[in-house]
Image (cartoon, grey):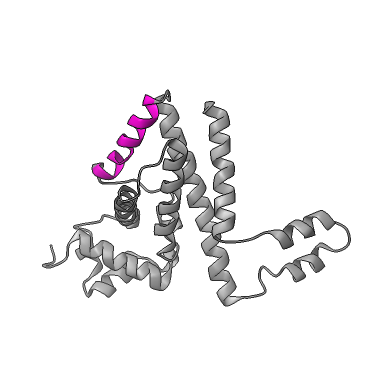
Amino acid sequence: MTKGITRELIVAAALELLDDQGIDGLTVRALATRLGVRAPALYWHVRNKQELLDEMATEVMRRVTAAFAAVQPGTGWRDDLTAYARVLRSEYLLHRDGARVFSGTRITEPDVVRMKEPLFERWTASGWKPADADDAVDVVTAFVVGFVIEEQERRQAAETDPTRYSTTQRDAWLGEGASLVKEAGHLQDDGDQRFERHLDIVLEGLAARLGS
């Protein structure tokens, strides 16, 4: 084992590399170079890139857990899930490709998974089943992951090609007709407003499904 190299140091360096190079540039070899060691030295701590991504996602979720714990508890499940979704999105946006890193990963720290227990206790006390509570968190998490992946892709692509999402060029490409599609395209907003609107749609769906 290389002296001075810890899993915590590896994850911190990996998040920095992610911000610099994006997920496609995040390799064990590049990470080893950043840390000034040979790649085999890292395999004492992470066996492959997937395990590295698992550890990075776990660190992000540690921060989500801490930030969520600092939020004043709401009056019900809807307030809880709204606060969770906002915190999750904020943490993903702190890192380039932050949501892509999380997708398909496995949390490696029990305390991070246990963060759901107080929520489940409150929700089941109001009549939910544990499976309903778990589904609600999973649905909101999936929504945030997908939303932020798209959000970050659009932001990063616009930096290199400002015309990529031009509504004027899109209208010309669509040609004659499709007036409603064009109108909707011009009204579409990005960022916080769109996130809150889409989150509300998700929560309304959960409310209808669960009869809450």
Image quadrant occupied by the N terminus: bottom left
- Residue in the image at 53% along x and 34% along y: 206
- The region drawn magenta spans 111-125
Q: Residue at x 40, y 64 (%)?
A: 94
Residue 173 percent across, percent down from the top left: 79, 66
Which residue is more in the foreground, 121 or 153?
121
Name which quarter of the figure residue 168 lies in: bottom right
Residue lying at the far left of the rendered structure: 3
Q: Residue at x 26, y 70 (%)?
A: 32
Examine the residues drawn in magenta and state their main secondary structure: helix
- In the image, farthest residue toward the right: 176
109 relative to 52, above or below = above
List x then y, in percent, for residue 174. 81, 62
**Is 74 rendered above or below residue 27?**
above
Who is closer to the viewer here, 26 or 173? 173
Residue placed at 25% from the left, 46% from the top?
109
Q: Tell which of 186 and 110 is nearer to you.
A: 186
In this rendering, the answer to whether 9 lies above or below 212 is: below
Is residue 18 rendered magenta in the image? no
Could you say which is closer to the camera, residue 159 or residue 47? 159
**Residue 186: image x %, image y %?**
73, 62
The percent position of residue 63, horizontal first and vertical second, equals 31, 55
Is residue 114 located in the magenta-colored stretch of the structure?
yes
138 horizontally vs 167: left or right: left
Residue 157, by quadrant, is bottom right
